[in-house]
């Protein structure tokens, strides 16, 4: 059965979600997140899109962009392919990282544009990662408040005021307004498991102390690591931290 054609936006603006395959984490540390932002900036400079907002979560990314000289599918493929190549090299892994087909929705007018913009920046709050949008480092909020230069913020700020300072003030107030809006969503993998609970599971299911996994016989170790990676609410970094096994070894299992 052929895939359904992606709906075309009359404005060229889309809300895009890039998801980790099988809902797995796509970032293991801050360097990974910085690298993804670098990729957004790099391909934006190639004139493939205008960028209005982004938010990097654990297992997915929200992007609000407008296609330019290239269609949206090309822009997203450039970003994902480049990042995955770097990520796989860093962690000595191979294979897919993102789901093959990204999710998108059209943004056809300014009203919905602002709705999506607020939704994206409030994502970390709704996921209970932070209590205030200014506390989350991995979104475009800081760019709008004056730091960074990859977001096309003038288009947005001009909607609030012609005076820069006043525009930022009104924009900030708008983002903080409580909202029950639901835009394009991704199923969250957010039952964040504590390290203590992970240790208990390793003992309950495999009969060994978590810190002994690093010296376990290799075949047995690989079997356990494979099963741990299937658990919801944990990351490769957490498994490494809890067991002492390297992230590279866990990725390869």
Image (cartoon, grey):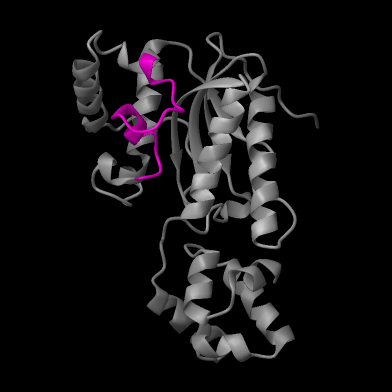
Tell me where residue 155 appears, x and y as whole percent: 39, 13
Tell me where residue 15 appears, x and y as whole percent: 50, 26
Residue 147 vs 124, above or below: the answer is: above
Tell me where residue 145 appears, x and y as whole percent: 28, 30
The N terminus: image quadrant: top right
Is residue 234 one of those drawn in magenta?
A: no
Is residue 140 one of those drawn in magenta?
A: yes
Residue 62 vs 90, above or below: the answer is: above
Relative to 246, is 85 on the left or the right? right
Tell me where residue 165 appears, x and y as whole percent: 20, 19
Relative to 204, is 137 on the left or the right? left
Judging depth in this view, the residue of 57 and 70 nearest the camera is: 70
The answer to which image quadrant residue 193 occupies is: bottom left
* Residue displayed at 57% across by 20% down: 49
* Residue displayed at 49% across by 31% down: 63
What's the magenta region?
137-154
Relative to 55, is 213 on the left or the right? right
* Residue displayed at 51% across by 39% down: 37
Judging depth in this view, the residue of 191 and 140 nearest the camera is: 140
Residue 103 vs 105, above or below: the answer is: below
């Amino acid at each position: 059965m052929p895939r359904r054609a992606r709906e075309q936006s009359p404005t060229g603006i889309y809300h895009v979600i890039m998801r980790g395959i099988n809902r797995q984490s796509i970032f293991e540390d801050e360097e990974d997140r910085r690298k993804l932002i670098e990729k957004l900036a790099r391909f934006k400079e190639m004139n493939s899109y205008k960028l209005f907002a982004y938010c990097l979560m654990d297992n997915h990314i929200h992007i609000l962009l407008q296609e330019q000289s290239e269609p949206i599918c090309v822009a997203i493929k450039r970003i994902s392919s480049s990042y995955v190549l770097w990520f796989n090299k860093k962690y000595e892994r191979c294979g897919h990282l993102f789901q093959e087909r990204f999710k998108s929705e059209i943004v056809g007018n300014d009203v919905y544009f602002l709705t999506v913009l607020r939704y994206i920046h409030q994502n970390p709050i709704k996921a209970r990662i932070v209590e205030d949008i200014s506390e989350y480092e991995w979104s475009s909020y800081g760019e709008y408040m004056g730091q960074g230069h990859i977001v096309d913020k003038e288009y947005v700020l001009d909607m609030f005021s012609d005076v820069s300072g006043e525009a930022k003030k009104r924009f900030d107030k708008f983002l903080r307004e409580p909202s029950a809006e639901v835009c394009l969503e991704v199923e969250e993998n957010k039952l964040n498991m504590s390290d203590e609970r992970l240790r208990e599971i390793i003992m309950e299911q495999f009969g060994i102390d978590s810190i002994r996994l690093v010296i376990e016989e290799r075949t047995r170790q690989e079997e356990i690591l494979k099963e741990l990676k299937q658990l919801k609410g944990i990351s490769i970094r957490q498994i490494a931290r809890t067991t002492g096994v390297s992230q590279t070894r866990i990725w390869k299992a």
